[in-house]
Amino acid sequence: MFDTILIANRGEIACRVMETAQGLGVRCVAVYSDADARAKHVAMADAAVHIGGSAPSESYLRGDVIIQAALESGAQAIHPGYGFLSENPDFVEAVEAAGLVFIGPSASAIRAMGLKDAAKALMIKAGVPVVPGYHGADQDDALLAEEAGKIGYPVLIKAVAGGGGKGMRLVEEAKGFQAALDSARSEAKTAFGNADVLVEKFVAKPRHIEVQVFGDGSKAVHLFERDCSLQRRHQKVIEEAPAPGMTQKMRDAMGDAAVKAAEAIGYAGAGTVEFIVDGSDGLSADGFFFMEMNTRLQVEHPVTELITGVDLVEWQLRVAAGEALPAAQEDLCINGHAFEARLYAEDVPAGFLPATGTLTHLAFTPQTRADSGVRAGDTISPFYDPMIAKVIVHGPTRDVALARLRAALSGCQVGGTVTNLAFLGALAGHEGFGKGDVDTGLIARDIDALTSVPAVEPRHVALAGMAALGVLEVKADTGFTLWRALRRSVTLAWGGEEHLLKVRIMGQDKQVWSIGETEVVATRRGAQWFIDGQPAADIAVADGVVTVFEGYGMAFDVIDPLARASGAQGDGNLVEAPMPGLVRTVDAKVGQAVSKGDRLAVLEAMKMEHALLAARDGIVAEVLATEGDQVEAGAALVRLEAEAEEAA
C-alpha cells in the first residue's frame, strides 16, 4: 500500500477519498485554488499545496503543477477523483512518466472509451449491444441530417467527447435538426474542445441503467446495476441500486456485457458502463444498449457501496498498489436497496439556475450518509459545481429505503443559499417513482408539480418573527410594561412581498401574533414552543435572514426600515445576468424588434450554457455586453426601449 497519495481534486470527492485513504493509514496531500484556501478538503488533508487561481484552468486542470506538487510532497500516487483531469489520458501518461502511479485506468483504456463513436465501434466488436445510429467521422451537416432521417425521428444529437448532458440535443422532427445541431456543436466545443457529434435513435421510454465494473488490467467483475433514470436536462438527480423491476436474466446479461466491455480494453480500477434501456414494456434481456463508459469513479458510487458492502475507493487504492482483484464475481451479492439524492445550491423557481452564497447552517439527520465537501461557514463559489452534498440512505427493501430518503430530505437543514431540497423531496414523494415506474422523461412531464413552492403557513411566519425579535427566550420582567402586555412589531419579506407582523407578549410562556387578519398563539411548555398547537420547527438566524426548517426550509428576510435602500428599483426593461459568468454570445442588436421568448444572449456559468430570453415584445435600445465579457450577477446585458405607455 502507498504511504502518501495526492488527491487531484476538490470538494466532496476529495473528502470522500481522504476518508478511506486515511482510514487505511495513508497520508493524504490536498491541492487547492485561491477560492478553496479554507475549504473542507484542505482542512481534512495531512498536507495541502496551493496550485493557482480560482478558475479550473488556473488550478485543477494544471496537470504539470499537480504532478510537481505530488513529487515535492513525497506522494507515490495520484487519485484523480471525478471530473477535471480524471479522464485525461495525456495527464495519465504524464503522471507515469514522472514515476508516479495513476490511481485509475491506463491512458489507452481512457482513449478507447473517450470518444463515443469509436467506443461504440469497439463495443460492437466485443459483442455488446449498441443503439442504432450514425457514429462516423464525416461531420457534414447534410450527411448528418440524412442519417437522422434514415434512423427515424426522434433522434439524439450527442457530442462524441461529451458527458453530463453537455452537447446533447433531442430532435423531434426534421425541421428542428439544423438548429439543434448548431447548438449542440457550440456547447460541445466550449465544454470539450471538440465539436464533433454522433446521431442516435431516441428510445421512446428510456431508462438509464448503468453497471459498476472493476478490473485489474486483465480480468474484471461487475458490482451490479444502478438506475439513474431520474434526470433533468440529462443531469442525474436521484440514483438507486438495484434497479426497480430488474430480472435476474437481464441483470446477468447486462453484467456480462459490462464485463466484456471492461476486459476488451484491459480496464484497471473502478469504471461504469452506461446503458440506455427500453422501458416501454418492462425490462427484457434484449432491450438494453451500450451508451458510454465512464473511466473513473462515479458521483453515485455510494449506492453500490451500500448494497454490496464494498468500499470502492479502498479497492482502487489496493489494485493501484499492485494487488489482484479483491473479490471474485461469485463473492459479490446484493444486500437491500440504496438511494442517493444530489443536493445542490440551485434556484429552482428561476429554472434551476446555479446559486452562490455562504452556508450559514448545514445539518443532516443522524441516519443519513451525507458525502459533502462543504461545512457551515463555507462559500458556494461560481467557479465550480454547486453541489452541497449527496444525501444517501440504505434499507432492507426499496420501500424502506425510499421512506428513509424522504425522512433524510425532510430533516436536512441548509441556511444561507437557496437549494433544490424541496424539489428532491417532491421527487421522493412522487407516486410513479414510489412504484418504481421511472424513465428519463418523468421529471420533464411533471415539472410543474415537482417545482411547486411549499406553502408558508402563519405559524411559520410567527416563528420567524419570534426569532427576528429575539423573543424565543423572554425574561420574567420583559413581558409587561406598566402592567400591560408588551407590544412589538417586525417586518419580514417572503414570497416577493413585505409583511408587517405584530406581537403581544403576554408573559414568558405566551405570545399572540397578528399577521394581517390572522392571529396565531404561541405557548411554551417546558423548553418547547408550540405555535397554534404544533411544535415549533428548528430555526437558524444569520445575516438578517431567518430560516425555518420545515417544508424543506423557508427563508424570511428581516427588513430594517432605516437600512432600506432608496432609489429606483429598475424599469423592468433590463435583461440582467442571473449569476456570475462568461457572455458566450450576444444575439441582440440595437434597433432590433424582438418577441417574448427570443434569445438575446447566452451566458456560460458553472459549465453550462444558459439562454437569456426577452421577457416581452419590444425594441432593443442598448446592448451593454459583448461576447467574451466576464460579468457579475445582476450585470445589465441588454436594455429594451420603454413601452409606449411608460414613455408617455
Image (cartoon, rainbow, N blue to C red):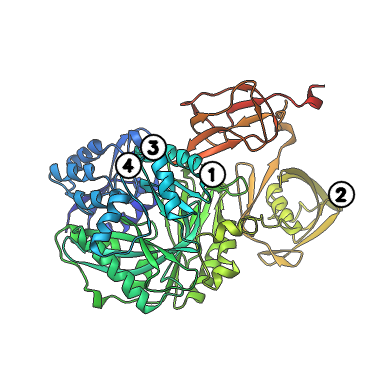
Secondary structure at numbered mark 1: helix
Secondary structure at numbered mark 2: loop
Question: What residue is shown with label 3?
Answer: 189
Drawn side of residue 68 relative to residue 162, left or right: left
Drawn side of residue 557 relative to residue 51, left or right: right
Sequence-earlier tag: 2 or 3: 3
Question: Which residue is pictured at 40% across the width and 36% down the height?
Answer: 190
Q: Residues within 10 Å of mark 2 (few under 14, many from 20)?
A: few
Q: Amino acid at mark 3?
A: Lys
Sequence-earlier tag: 1 or 3: 1
Secondary structure at numbered mark 4: loop
Question: What residue is shown with label 4?
Answer: 138
Question: What residue is shown with label 1?
Answer: 175
Label 4 vs label 2: CA separation? 88 Å
Question: Which residue is pictured at 57% across the width and 69% down the height?
Answer: 432
Image-quadrant location for residue 137: top left
